[in-house]
Amino acid sequence: MRKVKYEIKKGFVKLLGNEKTQFIAIPVFSIIISLIAGSAVIALTGGSPFQAFKNLLQGCGILSKPSYAGFKSPLTDFTSFLNAMTPMLFAALAVSLALKAGLFNIGVSGQMLTAGFIASITVGYAASLPAPLAKLLVLFIGIAAGMLVGGLIGFLKHKFNINEVVSSIMLNYIAQYVIAFFINTKYVDPVSRQSKEVTDASRLTLMGTAVGNLKIDIPLGIVLAVIAAFLLRFLIQRTTAGFEIKAVGASPKAAKYAGMNVGKNIVLTMMISGGLAGLAGVTYFLGYFASIQPKVLPSTGFDAIAVAILGNANPIGNIFSSFLITILSKGSTYMSSAGGVQAEIASVITGIILLCSACGVFIKDWVAKMKEEISEETKDGQKQEVH
């Protein structure tokens, strides 16, 4: 029995103990544990885990469905999946950058909503603008609006030491109800009771584009989102500003002692984070959707927290983690209709992934402890052989 425990410990250390690969190994371990737990939940509800996961992939266009309606194929499902993934990736990058500076930007949803609304009323309803100009203006306005809100949170943190979690939550509520008031009084669609739809020229997704015998939704923002991930990685890893942001996140007192302007870095980080959230907002409200539902904050801003944590706040890791979480959220509808499994199961799996990912530090300590135990047991075994 003791030998079996020793071999199990050795196996865990071999899989998770390499410090150079832990940033990948631990998230993958978290995903596997989450999928096992999700499978157990599906099985307890009377469903087939394998069929449920197959339906998830089919709903995203990664696997083929048994049949398709006219003008549809796996490609149309996959581009629709990428359309949903685009704002998720931008939002995850916003959360990740803030985490690098020791900040928790829980106000991404409010920043998304603000950027989406301002871009809609300034450009989205202007029918006379040519499409290239309208789309560029939407992007710039989204970035500017997000940066203003994010910068305000950073300024309140720097100037008055107001916790960014508190201020961002309060700004979420302010944005939610102020924007709902303006939509309901000035920009409401009398039929849908949502905001009026933006023009096709300003929309960041080319909806129903004819490609052969298919009609595809082409998300223009996905390329920009991937580029933003690499640029953010370059900023964090290769620039002085990125070094200072990480230093402030590690220890504000030590950073100040080293001569860094802590307040400036906090405001700068939140401005860039807000700008990324603004891009998430315009690709969501003027891309994936074309209108805004009053009094509703986009859940993408909150799901992005799970994506950022799963990706270890690494911009490149966020590409893969946003891909996974979007599979769960986007494919859950088809999973429910085709397999009879409740769509909420996907949210359960996402929650377990978040829980396991949040325990990353614990897992590292746990593996380090097992390393020490293996080392001690090995020394004891060698002593016994000598005697």
Image: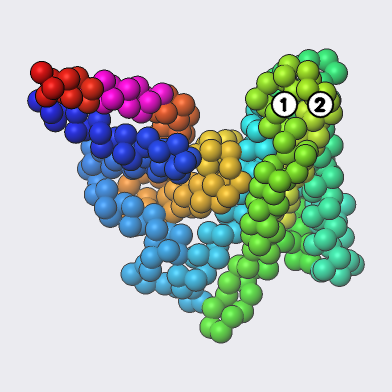
Q: Report the side of 232 relative to 80 (left or right).
A: right
In the image, is residue 68 above or below residue 31?
below
Q: Would you say 157 lies left or right of 31 here?
A: right
Question: What secondary structure is marked by label 2?
Answer: loop
Residue at 73% x, 16% y: name it. 253
Which one is in front in this view, the residue at disc 2 or the one at disc 1? 2
Q: Is residue 367 magenta?
A: yes
Instruction: Look at label 1 and name its amino acid.
Output: Val
State the residue at coordinates (73%, 49%): 279
- Residue 6 coordinates in the image, percent (x, y): 19, 28
Does the magenta run of residues contain 199?
Answer: no
Q: Are marks 2 and 1 in contact (CB under 8 Å)?
A: yes
Magenta residues, start to end? 365-377
Residue 260, disc: 2
The residue type indicated by label 2 comes to Met
Question: CA gap, disc 2 to disc 1?
Answer: 8 Å
Residue 321 seen: yes
Q: Earlier in the sequence, mark 2 or mark 1?
A: 1
Q: Residue furthest toward the right?
A: 128
Residue under the image location 25 percent in, 30 percent down: 9
Quarter that holds the N terminus: top left
Does residue 172 sit above or below 88 in this rendering?
above
Q: Which residue is mark 1?
A: 248
Instruction: Say which of 151 and 290 sits in front.
Output: 151
